[in-house]
Amino acid sequence: MNATELRSAVLDALQEIAPEADLSILSEDADIRDELDLDSMDFLNFMIGIHERTGIDVPERDYPRLGTLRAALGFLSRQSGGAA
């Protein structure tokens, strides 16, 4: 997946669990959980949504590495063989 496809997949996964959120104003460096008021179950559903959309498995030990949009996109890019 290229960077645009990854970004779209991540934002789609977020929109599914936080449909009321305006993701166009989400800062790339903002803590996703804090900004979107996600609890642990929401964040788990976010990880599942990422996997469903990208086919990239995110081990539970790596969940903390996907706390911001920038970090999530970087992690997913590396996992998919793209540039960091």
Image (cartoon, rainbow, N blue to C red):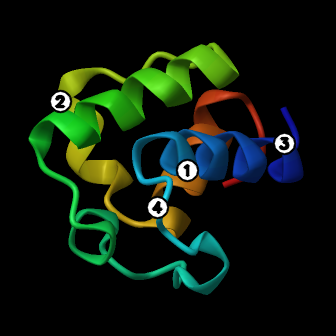
Q: Which residue position is annotated with label 2? A: 61
Q: Name the amino acid type tagged 3.
A: Glu
Q: Which residue position is annotated with label 1? A: 15
Dot 4 alpha-carbon crowd within 10 angstroms: few under 14, some 14 to 19, many 20 or more: some
Mark number, residue 5: 3
Q: Residue at x 13, y 50 (%)?
A: 39
Q: Left or right: 83 with respect to 67? A: right
> In the rendered structure, which disc, 2 or 4, sits on the residue that comes first in sequence?
2
On the question of residue 76 being in view, the answer is: yes
Dot 3 alpha-carbon crowd within 10 angstroms: few under 14, some 14 to 19, many 20 or more: few
- Asked whether disc 2 touches disc 4, contact meaning CB atoms under 8 Å apart, the reply is no
Dot 2 alpha-carbon crowd within 10 angstroms: few under 14, some 14 to 19, many 20 or more: few
Q: Nearer the viewer, mark 4 or mark 3?
A: 3
> In the rendered structure, which disc, 1 or 2, sits on the residue that comes first in sequence?
1
> In the rendered structure, which disc, 3 or 2, sits on the residue that comes first in sequence?
3
Q: Which residue position is annotated with label 4? A: 71
- Asked whether disc 1 touches disc 2, contact meaning CB atoms under 8 Å apart, the reply is no
Q: Is residue 37 above or below residue 62?
A: below
